[in-house]
């Protein structure tokens, strides 16, 4: 038999209560005090990649439009058409 959810700090989880006071819960979204475990590693890898790549390039220029990702959750570039000349 499935367990019945227990009432926590916000009351029973299955009940919708419009009079409930605001709950400043902890989330993993924007403005959160939490960071992903791989965050520091990813930033370090990107920094090292650019430190090695940039000195090897004589020139880099755009060759077309830069379409953006259309999303409510992600902001970024979909494609970056470029021409690169090696040093």
Image (cartoon, helix red, strand yellow):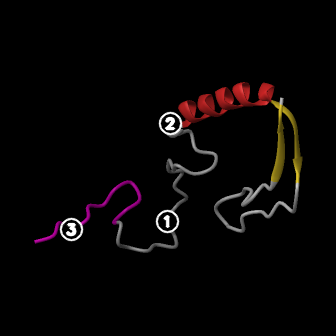
Q: Are marks 3 and 2 in contact (CB under 8 Å)?
A: no
Between disc 1 and disc 3, the foreground one is 3
**Residue 38, disc:** 2
Mark toward the start of the polypeptide (3 vs 2): 3
Q: Which residue is mark 1?
A: 20
Q: Residue sitting at 49 percent across and 65 percent down?
A: 20
**Residue 4, disc:** 3
- Please say whether residue 87 is one of the residues in the magenta stretch: no
From the top left corner, tell me how far across and down residue 80 is, in percent: 78, 55
From the top left corner, tell me how far across and down residue 21 is, in percent: 52, 60
Between disc 1 and disc 2, the foreground one is 2
**Spatial distance from mark 1 to mark 3, Cα to Cα?**
21 Å
**Residue 61, disc:** none
Q: Magenta segment, which residues?
A: 1-12
From the top left corner, tell me how far across and down residue 48 is, in percent: 65, 26
Residue 21 is left or right of residue 87, and the answer is: left
Q: Quadrant of residue 77?
A: bottom right
Q: Are marks 1 and 2 in contact (CB under 8 Å)?
A: no
């Amino acid at each position: 038999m499935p367990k019945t959810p227990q009432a926590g700090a916000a009351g029973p989880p299955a009940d919708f209560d419009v009079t409930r006071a605001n709950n400043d819960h902890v989330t993993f979204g924007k403005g959160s005090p939490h960071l992903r475990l791989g965050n520091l590693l990813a930033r370090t890898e990107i920094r090292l990649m650019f430190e090695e790549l940039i000195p090897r390039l004589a020139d880099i220029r755009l060759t077309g439009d830069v379409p953006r990702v259309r999303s409510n959750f992600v902001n970024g570039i979909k494609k970056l058409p470029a021409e690169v000349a090696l040093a």
